[in-house]
């Protein structure tokens, strides 16, 4: 269980970190006055500062109003639901990069239908493959947009 | 009547069989993304945009704007039938639309929603027709400092008028600008903020951000809440529709007021969501039947729908005439215009009048097409939501990631989309507004260029931002909008000195 307070602090710290990254990254390129006006780091530098400043503001607000933020941010069962959605999705990205988007689509759909939709394995796998083929036809033929492919497509001679 | 002649010319451009078919396709796709959870107007337009890169700009913008209308209508459909807003801007429609549907008045609620939405959109488009040339002509006097001031005004109004904490709005906006800065610097041509990653050399596309923030983030929220579709079966009977049309004039006050609110919020970047809530709130406060609201009051459907669509369509005006989009979806479309090689802003009216007026004419036609199509296809789309989420959820995920890949054909973008999804989820849950981030990403380079050119003009002195009446006025309005809430609380404190000073 995560309280709203923890979530606020965590997100604000993350945002401040991103802002700081912009500030540090911008310093490398100069934030002063160059031959052609302001140097290229100037704008991102001040934007980064703005983010850091506003995040500190959020942190202060959250700390001061801590009592009002004790509500639950994420229940256990909610966390389980989000994880059961997020983890297969993250796995889908990894598999896509290894095997291409079409194969990953088929595996991902089949897996989710089988484990979470409680469909029979045969039905799930068939639907997954059908969906992948459907996407293939729509993208490569109707729109002529090639997307990321992997070893399977190469073995089949499809580019 | 210069505009009227131009508009007729625009109809000549827009009224071809090909364009009408595109409108119908766009509206259907739009209703689809509007109905599906996790896919909304900004996200749908982002997904479709890479597929239009090779099309003629006029045809492409007609397809995208039609999708926008369709998405707005689709969002209202699920609000009424399922109590699930398909779009953030149709949340207010659930308050009375769903109760109406439960009382067996689904057809009435839907018809009222679509017709008032159509009315709102029409008012928005008429406003564009009348004002756009004037605004564009006015904007021709703008040079860099004025443009920077206009951008400042747009973001200031987010900070001041938004419901979220001003700190969070600033964080969202600043991050957007920082993301936009990654990659090539448009002024010097050098690279920056890539931190040694080759993947960041070509920058972070705003389309990836939209797909992640609006699509994947939204889906995660939907999953967390646990999905339950208690749909109400709707069969649209022609007689009921006609009867409802006859009752519409009864709500003329609500219609006009809501359209005015919508247009105002659309032109200033308040956006459709704020407009629909504001309009609902006002309708409730000013109604003689206050206690009926929330229990199926027809005005409770008319008010948010009119404002939503009026804002949605009038958001196109500042995008076209000034190059400052009034909503997240308009921001995505403006990004599209720039990708097609068009430069949104006053010069567009001079360089590409066929494009501008073709677009405006297509907005009239597109909305009529949308109202007709949505009435005809509701049962079909409502049945889509009865497909189990274990099937439809992963399909939406796949569409989002394929969409992310088609933007530039870079595998790294898949990771970016996932990361933006997590950010979108956290931001949504913690009430960080997302629209400023998207707007900042689209406007980032333009705002920075405007700033740097102003600085060059003034040799580094900020005083250029109050060097003439025009730029000073815009800056002052911006400052007043941004600081308005702070000043009012400050004055409140001064009059009540005992109150503790909570925020340092």
Image: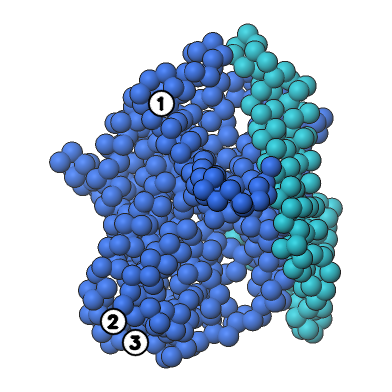
Chain colours: A cyan, B blue
Q: Is residue B52 left or right of residue B357?
A: right
Which badge, 3 or 2, is on the more N-terminal residue? 3
Estimate the x, y position of residue A83 in percent, counting from the top left.
Answer: 81, 67
SS under mark 2 = helix
- The quadrant of the picture occupied by the N terminus of chain B is top left
* CA distance for labels 3 and 1: 55 Å
Q: Nearer the viewer, mark 3 or mark 2?
A: 2
Q: Nearer the viewer, mark 2 or mark 1?
A: 1
Which badge, 3 or 1, is on the more N-terminal residue? 3
Residue, x 30% and y 68% (percent of image)? B254
Asked which quadrant contains residue B466, the reply is top left
Q: Is residue A138 above or below residue B388?
A: above
Mark 2 vs mark 1: same chain?
A: yes
Q: What residue is shown with label 3?
A: B237
Q: Marks 1 and 2: in contact by CB < 8 Å?
A: no
Estimate the x, y position of residue A159 in percent, counting from the top left.
Answer: 72, 50
The foreground one among B377 and A137 is B377
Asked which quadrant contains residue B110, the reply is bottom left
Q: Is residue B478 left or right of residue A123?
A: left
Residue, x 65% and y 11% (percent of image)? A34
Which badge, 2 or 1, is on the more N-terminal residue? 2
Estimate the x, y position of residue B297 in percent, counting from the top left.
Answer: 38, 81
Specify the label residue B244 is tagged with.
2
The foreground one among B217 and B463 is B463
Q: Is residue B314 above or below residue B294?
A: above
- The quadrant of the picture occupied by the C terminus of chain B is top right
* Neighbours of disc 2 within 10 Å: few (<14), some (14-19), many (20+): some
Residue, x 40% and y 26% (percent of image)? B471
Q: Is residue B32 above or below residue B487?
A: below
Point out the residue furthest to the left here. B1
* Neighbours of disc 1 within 10 Å: few (<14), some (14-19), many (20+): many
Q: What residue is shown with label 1?
A: B471
């Amino acid at each position: 269980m995560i309280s709203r307070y923890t979530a606020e602090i965590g997100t604000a710290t993350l945002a401040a970190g991103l802002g700081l990254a912009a500030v540090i990254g911008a310093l490398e390129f100069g934030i002063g006055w160059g031959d052609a006006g302001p140097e290229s780091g100037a704008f991102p530098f001040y934007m980064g500062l703005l983010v850091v400043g506003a995040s500190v503001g959020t942190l202060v607000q959250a700390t001061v109003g801590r009592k009002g933020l004790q509500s639950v941010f994420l229940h256990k069962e909610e966390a389980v639901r989000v994880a059961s959605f997020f983890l297969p999705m993250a796995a889908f990205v990894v598999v896509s990069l290894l095997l291409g988007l079409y194969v990953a689509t088929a595996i991902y759909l089949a897996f989710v239908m089988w484990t979470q939709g409680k469909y029979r394995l045969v039905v799930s796998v068939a639907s997954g493959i059908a969906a992948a083929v459907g996407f293939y036809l729509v993208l490569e033929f109707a729109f002529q947009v090639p997307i990321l492919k992997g070893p399977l497509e190469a073995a089949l001679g499809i580019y | 009547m210069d505009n009227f002649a131009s508009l007729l010319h625009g109809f000549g451009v827009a009224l071809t069989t090909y364009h009408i078919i595109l409108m119908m396709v766009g509206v259907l796709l739009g209703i689809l993304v509007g109905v599906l959870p996790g896919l909304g107007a900004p996200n749908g337009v982002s997904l479709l945009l890479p597929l239009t890169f090779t099309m003629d700009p006029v045809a492409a913008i007609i397809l995208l704007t039609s999708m926008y209308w369709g998405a707005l209508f689709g969002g209202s459909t699920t609000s009424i039938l399922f109590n699930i807003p398909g779009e953030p801007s149709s949340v207010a429609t659930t308050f009375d639309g769903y109760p109406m549907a439960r009382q067996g008045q689904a057809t009435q609620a839907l018809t009222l929603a679509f017709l008032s939405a159509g009315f709102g959109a029409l008012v928005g488009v008429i406003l564009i027709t009348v004002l756009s040339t004037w605004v564009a002509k006015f904007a021709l006097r703008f040079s860099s400092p004025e443009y920077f001031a206009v951008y400042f005004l747009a973001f200031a109004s987010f900070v001041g008028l938004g419901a979220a904490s001003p700190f969070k709005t600033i964080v969202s906006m600043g991050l957007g600008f920082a993301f936009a800065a990654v990659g090539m610097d448009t002024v010097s041509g050098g690279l920056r903020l890539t931190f040694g990653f080759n993947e960041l050399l070509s920058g972070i596309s705003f389309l990836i951000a939209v797909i992640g923030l609006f699509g994947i983030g939204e889906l995660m929220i939907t999953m967390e809440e646990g999905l339950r579709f208690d749909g109400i079966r709707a069969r649209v009977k022609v007689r009921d529709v006609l009867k409802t049309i006859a009752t519409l004039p009864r709500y003329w006050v609500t219609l006009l007021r809501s359209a005015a609110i919508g247009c105002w919020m659309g032109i200033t970047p308040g956006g459709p969501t704020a407009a629909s809530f504001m309009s609902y709130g006002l309708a409730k406060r000013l109604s003689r039947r206050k206690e009926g609201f929330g229990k199926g009051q027809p005005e409770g459907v008319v008010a948010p729908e009119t404002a939503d669509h009026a804002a949605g369509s009038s958001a196109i005006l500042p995008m076209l005439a000034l190059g400052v989009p009034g909503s997240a979806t308009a921001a995505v479309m403006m990004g599209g215009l720039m990708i097609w090689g068009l430069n949104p802003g006053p010069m567009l009216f001079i360089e590409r009048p066929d494009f501008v007026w073709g677009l405006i004419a297509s907005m009239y036609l597109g909305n009529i097409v949308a109202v007709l199509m949505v009435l005809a296809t509701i049962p079909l789309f409502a049945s889509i939501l009865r497909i189990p989420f274990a099937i439809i959820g992963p399909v939406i995920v796949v569409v989002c990631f394929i969409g992310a890949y088609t933007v530039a054909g870079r595998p790294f973008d898949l990771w970016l989309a996932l990361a933006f999804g997590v950010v979108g989820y956290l931001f949504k849950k913690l009430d960080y507004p997302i629209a400023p981030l998207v707007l900042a990403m689209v406007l980032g380079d333009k705002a920075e260029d405007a700033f740097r050119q102003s600085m060059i003009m003034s040799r580094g002195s900020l005083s250029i931002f109050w060097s003439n009446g025009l730029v000073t006025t815009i800056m002052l309005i911006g400052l007043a909008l941004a600081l308005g809430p702070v000043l009012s609380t400050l004055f409140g404190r001064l009059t009540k000195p005992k109150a503790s000073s909570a925020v340092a």
